[in-house]
Amino acid sequence: METSLCTFSPTKPHPPKTLTLKPQPTLFSIPTSPSFLRPKTSPVIRAAISRTKKEETVETLKKQLENCHLIAGISYKGLTVKQFQDLRKSLPDSVKLIVAKNTLINRAIDGTPWEALRPCLSGMNAWLFVHTEEIPTAIKPYRDFQKEKKLAENDFTGAVFEGKFYGPSDFKSLETMPTRAEIYAKLLGAMQSPAISLVSTLQAPARDLVLVLSAYVKKLEEEGGGN
C-alpha cells in the first residue's frame, strides 16, 4: 500500500491595506471666542450703566466743590498711567486730582460760582481740587512735576479762584501769592506802623484785610489772656 504525501506551496502574506478617511463636510462650527460664552448685554442695559456711572461722577465732583478754594485744569494728553500715579503721590492731602469729561464738570459747576471755569472746558483735562487757602503750596507740586518730566505741553488750562477765572498766562499771580503766614506778618506789621502804612493796609484786597483783622483780634486775645 503506497502512501502519498501532499505538499502545499507556501503562501505569501497579503500586504496590509491602508485605510484612508475622507474629510466629511462640516455641518456647523462652534465659535471658540470667549465672547461666545458671555451673555449679550442689551443696549438699554449698557446705556443705563453708563448713565449711572456719569451720575456718580457728577456727585463726586460736586462733593469736591465743597470747601474748595481753587479748581485748576491740566492738559493730560499724552500722560502715561505711571506718570499719573507719580503725580498723585506728589500732591498734598489737601489737593485731589480727578480725570473727568468736560461735560460732567460742566454739569457739576452749573449754577455755582465755579461756572467761571467754563472757558477751559475743552480738550483733555484733569482737574485739581484745592482744599486749602495756601494756593502756591498746593499747585507747586504739579509745576515741579511738569519741569522734572519735561511736560511743557501739559500746562494748566485755566483755574478759578474766588470766583475769578485765571488763564494759563495768569498763573504767575497764583503761584506767587503770599502765604497766610506772610500776610499775617506783613499786615500786622503795618498795623503797628505809622498811619500811611495803615492806609495802604486798608486799601489791600478784602481777603488780605480779613486775614489781618482776624490775626490782630487773635493777638489781642492772647495778650489779654496773658495779663
Image: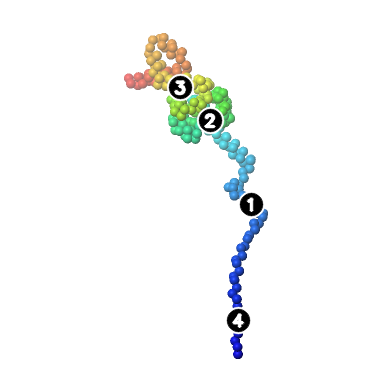
What number is the disc on residue 6? 4
Q: Residue at x 40, y 14 (%)?
A: 190
Answer with mark 3 or mark 2, whichever residue precedes in sequence: 2
Q: Residue at x 41, y 9 (%)?
A: 196
Q: Indicate the amino acid at tag 3.
A: Glu
Q: Residue at x 45, y 33 (%)?
A: 86
Picture mark count: 4
Q: Are marks 4 and 2 in contact (CB under 8 Å)?
A: no
Q: Indicate the amino acid at tag 4.
A: Cys
Q: Are marks 1 and 4 in contact (CB under 8 Å)?
A: no
Gap between marks 1 and 2 measured at Cα = 44 Å
Number of residues whose C-alpha sits closer than 10 Å to that of mark 2, classed few (under 14), some (14–19) or many (20 or more): few
Q: Residue at x 59, y 37 (%)?
A: 50
Gap between marks 4 and 2 measured at Cα = 102 Å
Mark 3 vs mark 2: in front = 2
Answer with mark 3 or mark 4, whichever residue precedes in sequence: 4
Q: Are marks 1 and 3 in contact (CB under 8 Å)?
A: no
- The x, y position of residue 114, in whole percent, is 54, 25
Residue named by callout 2 = 77
Q: Are marks 3 and 2 in contact (CB under 8 Å)?
A: no
Q: Is residue 23 visible?
A: yes
Gap between marks 1 and 3 measured at Cα = 66 Å
Q: Is residue 68 visible?
A: no
Residue named by callout 3 = 175
Please state which of residues 40 and 84 is positioned toward the viewer in this rendering: 84
**Which element carries disc 3, helix, strand or loop?**
helix
Gap between marks 1 and 4 measured at Cα = 64 Å
Question: In the figure, 17 relative to 33: above or below?
Answer: below
- The x, y position of residue 205, in whole percent, is 47, 16
